[in-house]
């Protein structure tokens, strides 16, 4: 579901076909923490955090304990928890109401609904080795000289993936995308991912 | 300096306090002690041994010290560079080392002013410190580079014994030791019990480790790295935990290695270790000992004692020659040794296989001796065939075949020439760099082995660096633009190394000469102008001409294959670089990598991919070199293939080929085939041999036509794929900046669609390119397609790219080399049947229902067929397919109720068998053992390096069988195995009648003139096969296999037995009708 919504907004399809729509969702606590994570809480910082925050203004509206909810299965029956432990774990957790407001300036001249999959791929690959240095990742993302890119985005060569803010990733992507004197900007091609068409 | 050494001595004393011996062996101490006595003196011995070794170090150290002083005048950095060389001086040279000369002339300092003196003193101190550091380093290095020879035994008595005897002068002869060692060999404590409790996973990991270590040791022996193998064994042996992982085959590997070298001392050391580990020597250990004695030409009495001991252990002398996988030379030496002790001994003659005959009732006529054996001969004379053999041999020795591509050659413009030149320069540079990188890798791996870490060192030594480099450059050359997954690339590289190594070994062992002699004799049977007195089938004749030696090349564990390939891929990624701007090759330019390691995200998995730089692909395209490289086993053979005589010998002359192909890493088929009596396989062996003996040639006129179309725009309707230039292109590349998001999404979809089509076209085109290029390469030649079978017994040609399997285009390119005029009925065959299409739509579904196709799958099949009909309204495909599949299923349920009952019975039986924890096995009517390789996935991961690789294997027999696959697979696989039996029977009987015959599964070919005969044979054999009580035979076999022995008391097994015994009734179909049916086979 999460990936579906992300693909939808980046490709301007489904509910985003006619423009920006604000969504309010309940997420479990861990997931919502991840959605809002940044380098300040590195343990929760994932590729998804970046993709959410680049696309939306993510806001926590309200926290409500699980116990306030009845859980029903699709047939309307009250669902039995799989085990006692998982029930306890669940009841201790909270559900978070999250407001997702799409950014007005998500798309630019360089990040568009046509090439967003490259941005997805770039982010995912970076977070494969989260503690690695950006400069090491760049060599397997783009044939363009890594030092040049770093210079352009004004980052130090020792910068690590988990030290980069979501906006930094967008900036990185746009920098590589707009570099002029290279015929080939990315090592990625469509073959490498099951793109939802 | 002396203080330092003293310290080491003290450390040695410390070691004496370290407890020796293993608690597990305490029980035996009494008996051992009684035998050898002197418990007191022996208790202190392990430390003495260590001290001895320390003295060895000390001597070496002195050499190094002298060298250090020599070098001190030079600057330190230079010295460091030389350190490695110094450290490599072997220990043996140490004895002639220059003695230490006292250095330092302190008196001279007195004459100088005090300030100077102070400064000098300071400098001297610094120097001394530096020197000390250097010495420490050297010491470490020296120890690293020394391989251990003497074992460190954990059993104190044994260690003492070894120690005493080593120090005693004059030493009692080694043979004496060996005889004593063999006596009273302790029986191993039952260690298996310990693992019963351990959980399954850790046990499997443990076994995998053992397997890897054994493969490592074996490879060391092959790569002539015996001292290293010995060192590793000693290392493992000296630690009680690691020692437990050592198995008898590991010790035996070393024994055999030392025996071949005639190194008695090391051999005895290994025997010491074996005894220490509580392992009793087996037949192979004795064979090694005897072989070593044979090589050293020792006197009869020693050998006699050894033989006597062997007899006491209950081992038969005869078996040394029959049940051991020893090569000819080993056996000769062994015989020499045995003859010394027993001059009258005669080694048992292996029974001639051709005297044993298959007894299956279906094959009675084939093997009956009433009539002379009959089979189609080759149409070529002896001398021609001999010449063809030599050509094929040289192809296989070269291991690769270079073929010109049939693609249009580019006009040689300046640009093309420049690109070729650039490419050539780059390759030359890469070759040198790769060689260097390989050397470094080898050094690293050797170091790892010395330290007892897992290592690939011996595997890297099997081929020369040059050959490995060539292999890597080839890989780079064929890498497609999209790249290839690291896992498959690694596996392929690893397998290539293995195959090459096998071919090389055959060359080294002088097998080629013997092969040629045997093959030339064999040709007398096949050639058109020669006769052989004895009437035999080709396989029988081949067997009569000599004995087949047991295969000595065990396949490596899959993890080793992948690891090796991965290592090379890594070297390739790290080493191969090109200038960032290919237009100008200058050394000053910045170098960028050619290969990139990227990830692809597919659902939950991340797949590592090696991808070439687009500029490199561009360069290759511009250069348009138009040559392709194939492995020699991927190309049809130029002479009749070797007859199949065993599960692993046949087909190609040198390249290893398996009788039954399987996924890499599954070995249960191989085990079953090796376990079954050779005569049982005769039917399959003969059928495959004869299928391979059919000579082919390229139909030149068809090839010309196809090539013309191919190099124009292709013609998908005729099955000739189009080039990339014909791929659909998206309408517009550039969008206006203000285009709506909708428009952009549309464009995205269109792009994706185009890309998909382009990719499909590319793969079809490449496939056709390979096929046509090989056809062009073989034009005007006669060639042969060796055959093997899959795990169900279906036959396939071995060369993958160019064969008679596949589309009409593929078949049209080939014709029988020996043409025959069309007979009276020939014209009927050429007629095209009309109204076929309406049958084709549902045929696949009707056929596959018997195999257990579900309604869903059936609908998809019909949908596909309907889509192929150009005049069918495409909008209704979905509804129509639904309607049809319902109709088909309903009508089938009425018609084939008994067939369904049989299918249910098979499925249910398979389910119960799989539930009881075993894989389903059966034997085809022709005697081929079949096992379904469906188990739960076992995950193997290889970490480290550029990426951790994880791969799943469903063929791991340690895992539980996959019940779903076992049960769903049984009915179709069983029927396939019957079909293949029918095909083989038809083939054998056709050959009996002297017909040329080839087949693709259920499609049989012969000369047009012989079709009538083939038709008759085909029907007859079908009736005969199905007149057999096939299901009852199956039931009997399954009951015997799964419900006998200790298992039979189990309630589950009782249920299974009940199910197996309730064989469903077969239908009332009158088989004789088949003989008269026109469309039985169309």
Image: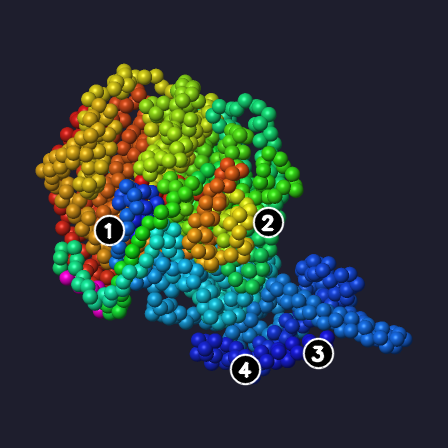
- The chain letter for the residue carrying disc 4 is B
Q: Secondary structure at mark 2?
A: helix
As measured in the structure, the alpha-carbon distance from the residue carrying label 4 to the one carrying label 3 is 33 Å
Image coordinates for residue A4, horizontal then vertical, percent: 30, 48
Q: Which residue corresponds to the image point at 27% horizontal and 67% vertical from the top-left?
A: A93
Q: Earlier in the sequence, mark 4 or mark 2?
A: 4
Q: Which residue is mark 3?
A: B3
Locate residue B999 relative to residue B1080 in the image: left or right: right
Residue B190 is inside the magenta segment: no
Residue furthest bottom in the image:
B40
Q: Residues within 10 Å of mark 4 (few under 14, many from 20)?
A: some
- The chain letter for the residue carrying disc 1 is B
Q: Which residue is mark 2?
A: B437
Range of residues picked out in magenta: A78-84
Q: Which residue is mark 4?
A: B39
* Labels 2 and 1 in the same subunit: yes
Of marks 4 and 2, the one in the foreground: 2
As measured in the structure, the alpha-carbon distance from the residue carrying label 1 to the one carrying label 3 is 72 Å
Q: Residues within 10 Å of mark 1 (few under 14, many from 20)?
A: some
Where, quadrant-wise, is the N terminus of chain B in this rendering?
bottom right
Q: Which residue corresponds to the image point at 25% horizontal and 46% vertical from the top-left?
A: B969
Image coordinates for residue B277, horizontal then vertical, percent: 48, 70
* Labels 4 and 2 in the same subunit: yes
**Of residues B403 and B580, the one drawn nearer to the viewer in this rendering:** B580
Label 2 with label 1: CB-CB less than 8 Å = no
Locate residue B1052 relative to residue B993 in the image: left or right: left
As measured in the structure, the alpha-carbon distance from the residue carrying label 2 to the one carrying label 3 is 42 Å
Q: Secondary structure at mark 1?
A: helix
Q: Residues within 10 Å of mark 3 (few under 14, many from 20)?
A: few
Q: Which residue is mark 1?
A: B964
Of marks 4 and 3, the one in the foreground: 3
In the depicted structure, whether residue B568 falls above or below residue B480:
below
């Amino acid at each position: 579901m999460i990936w579906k919504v992300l693909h939808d907004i980046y490709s301007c399809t489904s509910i985003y076909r006619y423009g920006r729509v604000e969504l309010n969702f309940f997420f479990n606590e861990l997931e919502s923490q991840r959605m809002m994570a940044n380098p300040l809480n590195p343990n929760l910082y994932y590729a998804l955090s970046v993709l959410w925050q680049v696309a939306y203004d993510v806001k926590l509206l309200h926290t409500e304990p699980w116990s306030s909810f009845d859980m029903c299965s699709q047939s309307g029956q009250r669902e039995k928890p799989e085990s006692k432990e998982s029930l306890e774990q669940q009841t201790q957790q909270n559900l978070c109401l999250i407001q997702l407001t799409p950014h007005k300036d998500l798309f630019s001249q360089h990040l568009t609904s046509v090439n967003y999959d490259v941005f997805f791929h770039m982010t995912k690959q970076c977070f494969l080795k989260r503690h690695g240095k950006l400069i090491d990742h760049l060599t397997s993302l783009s044939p363009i000289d890594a030092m040049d890119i770093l210079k352009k985005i004004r980052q130090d060569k020792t910068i690590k993936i988990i030290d980069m803010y979501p906006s930094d990733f967008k900036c990185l992507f746009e920098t590589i995308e707009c570099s002029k004197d290279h015929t080939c900007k990315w090592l990625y091609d469509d073959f490498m991912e099951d793109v939802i068409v | 300096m002396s203080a330092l050494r003293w310290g080491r001595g003290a450390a040695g004393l410390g070691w004496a306090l370290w407890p020796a011996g293993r608690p597990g062996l305490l029980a035996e101490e009494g008996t051992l002690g009684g035998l050898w006595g002197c418990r007191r003196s022996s208790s202190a011995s392990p430390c003495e041994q260590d001290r001895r070794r320390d003295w060895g170090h000390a001597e070496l150290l002195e050499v190094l010290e002298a060298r250090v002083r020599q070098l001190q005048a030079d600057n330190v950095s230079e010295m460091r560079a030389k350190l490695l060389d110094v450290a490599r001086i072997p220990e043996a040279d140490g004895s002639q080392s220059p003695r230490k000369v006292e250095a330092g002339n302190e008196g001279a300092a007195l004459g100088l002013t005090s300030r100077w003196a102070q400064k000098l003193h300071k400098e001297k101190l610094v120097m001394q410190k530096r020197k000390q550091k250097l010495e420490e380093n050297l010491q470490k290095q020296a120890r690293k580079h020394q391989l251990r020879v003497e074992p460190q035994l954990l059993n104190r008595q044994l260690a003492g014994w070894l120690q005493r005897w080593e120090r005693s002068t004059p030493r009692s002869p080694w043979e004496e030791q060996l005889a004593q060692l063999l006596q009273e060999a302790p029986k191993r404590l039952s260690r298996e019990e310990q693992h019963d409790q351990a959980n399954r996973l850790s046990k499997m990991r443990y076994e995998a480790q053992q397997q890897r270590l054994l493969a490592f040791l074996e490879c060391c022996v092959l790569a002539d790295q015996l001292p290293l193998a010995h060192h590793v064994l000693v290392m493992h042996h000296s630690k009680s935990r690691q020692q437990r992982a050592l198995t008898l085959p590991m010790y035996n590997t070393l024994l055999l290695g030392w025996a071949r070298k005639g190194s008695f001392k090391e051999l005895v050391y290994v025997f010491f270790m074996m005894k220490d580990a509580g392992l009793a020597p087996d037949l192979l250990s004795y064979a090694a000992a005897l072989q070593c004695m044979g090589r050293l030409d020792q006197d009869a009495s020693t050998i006699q004692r050894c033989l006597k001991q062997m007899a006491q252990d209950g081992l038969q002398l005869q078996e040394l020659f029959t049940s051991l996988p020893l090569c000819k030379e080993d056996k000769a030496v062994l015989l020499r040794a045995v003859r010394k002790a027993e001059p009258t001994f005669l080694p048992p003659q292996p029974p001639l296989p051709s005297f044993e005959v298959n007894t299956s009732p279906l094959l009675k006529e084939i093997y009956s001796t009433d009539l002379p054996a009959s089979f189609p001969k080759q149409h070529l004379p002896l001398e021609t065939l001999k010449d063809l053999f030599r050509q094929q041999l040289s192809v296989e020795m070269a291991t690769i075949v270079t073929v010109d591509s049939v693609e249009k050659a580019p006009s040689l413009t300046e640009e093309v020439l420049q690109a070729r030149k650039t490419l050539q320069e780059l390759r030359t540079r890469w070759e040198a760099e790769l060689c260097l990188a390989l050397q470094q890798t080898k050094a690293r791996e050797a170091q790892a082995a010395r330290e007892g870490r897992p290592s690939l060192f011996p595997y890297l030594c099997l081929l020369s660096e040059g050959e490995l480099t060539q292999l890597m450059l080839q890989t780079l050359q064929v890498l497609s633009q999209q790249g290839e997954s690291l896992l498959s690339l690694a596996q392929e590289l690893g397998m290539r190394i293995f195959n090459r190594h096998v071919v090389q070994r055959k060359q080294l062992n002088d097998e080629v000469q013997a092969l040629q002699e045997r093959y030339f004799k064999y040709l007398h049977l096949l050639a058109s102008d020669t006769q052989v007195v004895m009437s035999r089938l080709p396989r029988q004749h081949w067997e009569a001409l000599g004995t087949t030696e047991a295969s000595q090349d065990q396949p490596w564990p899959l993890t080793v294959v992948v690891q090796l390939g991965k290592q090379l891929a890594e070297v390739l990624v790290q080493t191969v670089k090109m200038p960032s701007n290919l237009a100008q090759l200058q050394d000053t330019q910045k170098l960028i990598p050619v290969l990139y390691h990227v990830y692809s995200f597919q659902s939950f998995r991340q797949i590592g991919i090696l991808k070439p730089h687009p500029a490199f692909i561009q360069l290759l395209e511009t250069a348009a070199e138009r040559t392709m490289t194939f492995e020699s086993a991927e190309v049809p053979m130029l002479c009749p293939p070797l007859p199949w005589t065993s599960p692993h010998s046949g087909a190609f002359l040198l390249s290893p080929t398996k009788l039954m192909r399987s996924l890499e890493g599954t070995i249960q088929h191989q085990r079953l085939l090796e376990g079954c009596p050779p005569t049982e396989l005769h039917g399959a062996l003969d059928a495959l041999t004869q299928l391979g003996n059919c000579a082919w040639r390229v139909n030149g006129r068809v090839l010309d036509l196809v090539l013309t179309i191919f190099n124009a725009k292709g013609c998908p309707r005729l099955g000739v794929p189009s080039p990339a230039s014909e791929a659909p292109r998206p309408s517009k590349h550039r969008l206006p900046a203000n285009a709506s998001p909708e428009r952009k999404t549309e464009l995205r979809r269109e792009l994706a669609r185009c890309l998909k089509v382009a990719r499909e076209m590319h793969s079809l085109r490449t496939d056709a390119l390979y096929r046509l290029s090989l056809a062009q390469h073989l034009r005007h030649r006669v060639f042969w397609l060796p055959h093997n079978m899959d795990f169900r017994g279906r036959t396939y040609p071995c060369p993958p790219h160019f064969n008679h399997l596949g589309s009409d285009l593929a078949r049209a390119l080939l014709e029988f080399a020996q043409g025959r005029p069309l007979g009276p009925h020939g014209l009927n065959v050429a007629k095209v049947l009309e109204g076929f299409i309406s049958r084709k739509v549902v045929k696949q579904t009707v056929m596959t229902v018997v195999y257990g196709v579900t309604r869903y799958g059936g609908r998809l099949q019909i949908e596909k067929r309907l889509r192929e009909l150009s005049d069918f309204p495409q909008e209704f495909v979905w509804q129509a397919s639904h309607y049809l599949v319902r109709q088909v299923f309903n009508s089938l349920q009425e018609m084939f109720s008994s067939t369904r009952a049989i299918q249910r019975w098979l499925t249910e039986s398979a389910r119960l068998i799989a539930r009881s924890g075993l894989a389903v096995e059966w034997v085809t009517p022709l005697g081929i053992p079949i096992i379904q390789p469906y188990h739960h996935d076992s995950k193997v991961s290889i970490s480290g390096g550029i990426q951790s690789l994880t791969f799943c294997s469903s063929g791991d027999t340690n895992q539980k069988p996959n019940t779903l696959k076992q049960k769903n697979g049984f009915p179709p696989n069983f029927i396939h195995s019957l079909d293949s039996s029918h095909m083989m029977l038809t083939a054998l009987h056709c050959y009996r009648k002297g017909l040329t015959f080839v087949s693709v599964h259920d499609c049989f070919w012969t000369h047009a003139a012989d079709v009538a005969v083939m038709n008759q044979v085909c029907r007859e054999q079908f009736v005969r096969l199905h007149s057999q009580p096939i299901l009852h035979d199956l039931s009997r076999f399954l009951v015997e296999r799964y419900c006998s022995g200790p298992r039979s008391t189990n309630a589950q097994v009782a249920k299974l037995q009940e199910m197996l015994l309730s064989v469903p009734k077969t239908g009332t179909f009158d088989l004789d009708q088949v003989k008269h049916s026109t469309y039985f086979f169309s």
